[in-house]
Amino acid sequence: MELSEAAGVLGVHYQTAYRWVRDGSLSAQKVGTRYEIHRLDLEKFQAARNTPIPPPSTTRVRDWNELSSRFYLHITQGSEGSARGQVARLVGGGVDIVEVMEYLMAPALIEIGNAWREGTLSVAVEHRAVRICERILDAVSVARRGRPRGKVLVTTPTGDEHQLASTMAAVALRSRHWLVEDLGAEVPLDDLAALAAIEKPDFIVISLANPGVIQVADQMRQLLVQNGFATLVGAPGCRLSSLLAQLGEGQLDADALG
Ligand code: B12
């Protein structure tokens, strides 16, 4: 195909694609005065662009438990600056944000839930801690530049106000170059299906933190699948890395529940 067409496929201006040809990053054959791009070369280039290049890792985490316990103290004491600083140091040192959510934040939140259940931590303290986590995640969740891998709608099952799990899914997916539409919690199923029909996402992800709504989530998934939407459900204890692996491979584990 011609370079102008390839630029369109890549979603960039002709001059940008031309620069990539000139600096050798995009293979092309000169035919007269024009450049021809082979489809396979274009696909290879596109795949390389879509593969995130992690910053050089300078931080090696030896003990996530210790770090997470410290994070727990920061967020339960309302020390937002310290919590932010901890996350910023890890991410700045090249630690994947997905690991930070999985091994630093999630265990601290689970600990908060346990302390709340035992009556040693108040709802006010829990709310404050959650808001700190939400603000930290907002700050680190930036859409990557360039053509995304595809579109994903993220939400929770109806009846589940635990939005943070879906926020984590959204942040994880954005970090891997997916265009994420984060709908938050409590979207009625009909409205979700109607929006999906308009947005035509490649996947729908339903994240739940309250085990009491597993059946609701499964019913939602079945209905969305019947409507032609590839849908994944993540429940407590499911790994964000598993979500990414399944979407990355384009394969959906139909029984990804539990
Ligand atoms: C914060 C919190 C709240 C907040 C939520 C605020 C918010 N914006 O999210 C509020 C105050 C609203 C709340 C309310 C309630 N809560 Co609450 N809450 C929590 C708490 C402390 C953290 C929740 C959280 O973010 N977990 C998510 C992360 C941290 O963990 P995770 O579940 O393993 O999630 C991972 C996966 O889901 C994965 N993932 C995400 N998406 C996807 C997708 C795919 C496909 C895959 C593969 C993976 C994946 O990523 C996550 C990180 O690794 C939990 C404690 C806990 N153990 O989770 C209790 C907890 C969930 N809550 C609980 C309860 C009881 C309630 C209430 C019923 C309390 C009440 N009496 O009102 C209400 C229910 C409200 C409702 N209708 O939903 C219980 C549930 C117990 C049970 N077994 O049923 C828990 C477990 C606390 C406890 N220990 O008892 N809660």
Image (cartoon, grey):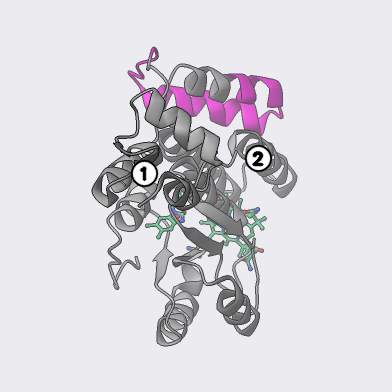
Q: Which mark is residue 25?
A: none
**Visible in this render: residue 156?**
yes
Is the distance from the Cβ of mark 1 to the nearest ligand 1 atom less than 8 Å? no
User: Residue visible at 62% across and 75% down?
Assistant: 195
Near-viewer residue (153 or 61)? 153
Q: Main secondary structure of the magenta part?
A: helix
Against 71, residue 29 (above or below) is below
Determine whether, in the image, residue 169 is placed left or right of residue 28.
right
Q: Secondary structure at mark 1?
A: helix
Q: Where residue 208 sits in the image (x, y, percent)?
A: 50, 63
- In the rendered image, which residue does mark 2 sit on? 138
Image-quadrant location for residue 128: top right
What residue type is disc 2 on? Asp
User: Residue visible at 30% across and 61% down?
Assistant: 250
Q: Where residue 30 sits in the image (x, y, percent)?
A: 31, 36
Q: Quadrant of ligand 1?
A: bottom right
User: Residue visible at 58% across and 42% down?
Assistant: 143
Determine whether, in the image, residue 180 is placed left or right of residue 134.
left
Q: Secondary structure at mark 2?
A: helix
Q: Which mark is residue 46?
A: 1
Quadrant occupied by the C terminus: bottom left
Question: Which residues are drawn in magenta?
Answer: 58-85
Query: Do residues under tags 2 and 1 come within 8 Å of each other at their CB atoms?
Result: no
User: Residue visible at 65% across and 70% down?
Assistant: 186
Near-viewer residue (158 or 232)? 232
What residue type is disc 1 on? Gln
Near-viewer residue (168 or 143)? 143
Q: Residue 64 lies in magenta, yes or no?
A: yes
Label 2, label 1: how far apart the Cα atoms are: 28 Å
